[in-house]
Image (cartoon, grey):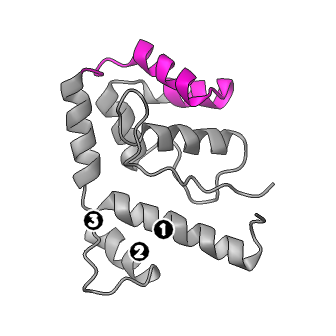
Amino acid sequence: MEPIYPLISSAAKGPLGVCHLPRLWLKILLFACGRLPEGYRHGEGGFDEFTTTNLGLDRDAFVAYIETEKPGYQQLEAWVKKHATKLDPASIAEHNEAILTRRMRDEIAIPRRAELGLAESDDLWNAVGLNDLDDWSSVHKEVVSGGISV
């Protein structure tokens, strides 16, 4: 089976209004179905773990729920409502601000920017923007090489 790139941005929010939650759900679901491209995190580290921690979710239970139940997104949000300990408006706002303004560490950003062909004058250093551009570039490369059929 062909890989499916998780093109949902970390900036995307579902009805609960939580940034990265839709992307996290998709990455874990794709992994559980054997469709996540190699090298993608799916529940541990980075924005994934940051999101479960900020919402007060047991990360292992969250990942296990998605992997075993394979819920639709609205089902996942219902599960999150039931299990999160930090889902109040202030906690969500703080989490979203942290996601949207996070600058990628230079040791990761500099090589990624080079791989993406960004010029020094390009002012794209935030993690969400670089991750989005990386996903789009990966999909483009796979589609034009025939690695993914459309």
- Quarter of the figure with residue 87: top left
Distance between mark 1 and mark 2 Cα atoms: 8 Å
- For the image, the number of numbered tags is 3
- Mark 1–mark 2 contact, CB under 8 Å? yes
Q: Is residue 114 above or below residue 76?
A: below
Q: Quadrant of the N terminus?
A: bottom right
Queried whether the magenta region covers residue 144, the answer comes back as: no
> As drawn, is 20 to the left or to the right of 68?
left
**Which of 91/45 is in front?**
91
SS class of the residue under badge 1? helix
Q: Which span of residues is magenta-colored?
A: 61-88
Q: Which mark is residue 105?
A: 3
Q: Is residue 70 above or below residue 51?
A: above
Residue mark closest to the camera, 1 vs 3: 1
Type of amino acid under label 3: Arg
Queried whether the magenta region covers residue 80, the answer comes back as: yes
SS class of the residue under badge 3? loop
Q: Which mark is residue 112?
A: 2
Q: Residues within 10 Å of mark 3 (few under 14, many from 20)?
A: few
**Which of 48/9 is in front?**
9
Type of amino acid under label 1: Asp
Q: Residues within 10 Å of mark 2 (few under 14, many from 20)?
A: some
Looking at the image, which residue is at 39% across and 40% down? 49
Q: Residues within 10 Å of mark 1 (few under 14, many from 20)?
A: some
SS class of the residue under badge 2? helix
The residue identified by callout 1 is: 134
Q: Quadrant of the C terminus?
A: bottom right
**Which of 73/1 is in front?**
73
Type of amino acid under label 2: Arg
Q: Earlier in the sequence, mark 3 or mark 2?
A: 3
Query: Is the magenta region chiefly helix, strand or loop?
Result: helix
List x then y, in percent, for residue 70.
66, 29
